Image: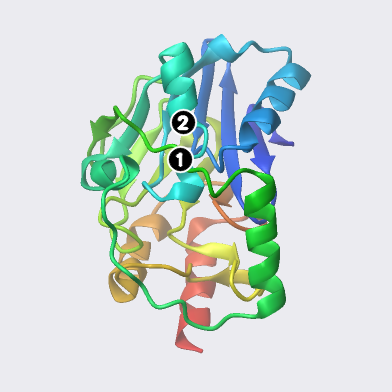
């Protein structure tokens, strides 16, 4: 789905990943669920671009609903997968802490699991090789994505700032659709390792200049990072 020139989304408001397109290639941000492979192929076909145009995948963190088809692209096409060093082990299938589920609605939870089943989400294929990155790195990929450390949801959570397309990709630093309750609007994401640290990290997001804030779950946000951060904090206070 085209959001703006050179900016596309695959998936939907339940789970999404993004494409940054440029004449010199394509950068992916996150890889959704394994079954989003077909969505990726369809989007590339609509763009008239071959799979070989993908130059790299940047993961906002290492959770299973963000690494989806990344290992397949790495193995089959040799495409590098970038992840913050503090989440590298998680992306390889290492242990992660148990987090409280918090509030949920059975209908929303069932909808999330049904969608995950359709997209082969129960067949996670973890990474065997990653390229570790750190806070402040500007990657040599189409769009020149910049890594901004956002610890809290996970130790190595990041947002990916791409001024060339006026966007910041936030993974689970926040959400606009809670996968467990179905509640829409800007709010903290569930399954967060350290909720207070995640809220504190939002200061870094609020300082960025972008026209789009693009979460891994929920509707794309058209507006400033500072405005959505204010709404997330209001939701957290409630």
What residue is at 67 percent from the left and 78 percent from the top? 106
Where is residue 3 drawn, in percent x and y?
71, 39
Which residue is at a point 65% across and 56% down the rendered structure image?
14
CA–CA distance between discs 1 and 2? 5 Å
> Please, what secondary structure does the residue beneath circle 2 have?
helix
**Which residue in the protein does label 1 denote?**
67
Whether residue 21 is situated above or below residue 191 in the rendered picture: above
The quarter in which the N terminus is drawn is top right
| Label 2 Cα crowd, 10 Å radius (few <14 / some 14-19 / many 20+) | many
Residue 39 in the image: x percent, y percent?
69, 32
Image location of residue 51, percent across then percent down? 59, 14
Instruction: Residue at 58% x, 69% y: name it.
Output: 186
Relative to residue 118, is residue 204 drawn left or right? left
Q: Nearer the viewer, residue 71 or 165?
A: 71
Identify residue for label 2: 70
Q: Which quadrant holds residue 34?
A: top right
């Amino acid at each position: 789905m085209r959001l703006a020139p050179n900016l596309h989304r695959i998936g939907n408001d339940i789970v999404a990943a993004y494409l940054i397109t440029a004449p010199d290639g394509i950068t992916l941000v996150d890889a959704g669920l394994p079954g989003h492979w077909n969505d990726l192929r369809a989007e590339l076909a609509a763009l008239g671009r071959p799979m070989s145009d993908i130059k790299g995948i940047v993961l906002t963190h290492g959770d299973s609903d963000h690494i989806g088809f990344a290992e397949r692209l790495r193995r089959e096409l040799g495409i590098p997968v970038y992840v913050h060093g503090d989440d590298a082990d998680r992306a390889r299938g290492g242990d992660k802490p148990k987090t409280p589920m918090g509030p949920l609605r059975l209908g929303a939870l069932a909808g999330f699991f049904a969608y995950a089943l359709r997209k082969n989400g129960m067949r996670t294929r973890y990474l065997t090789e990653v390229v570790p990155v750190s806070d402040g790195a500007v990657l040599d990929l189409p769009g020149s994505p910049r890594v901004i450390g956002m610890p809290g949801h996970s130790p190595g959570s990041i947002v990916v700032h791409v001024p060339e397309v006026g966007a910041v990709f936030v993974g689970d630093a926040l959400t606009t659709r809670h996968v467990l309750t179905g509640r829409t609007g800007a709010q903290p994401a569930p399954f967060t390792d350290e909720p207070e640290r995640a809220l504190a990290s939002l200061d870094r997001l609020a300082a960025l200049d972008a026209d789009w804030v693009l979460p891994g779950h929920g509707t794309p946000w058209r507006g400033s990072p500072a405005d959505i951060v204010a709404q997330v904090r209001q939701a957290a206070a409630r």
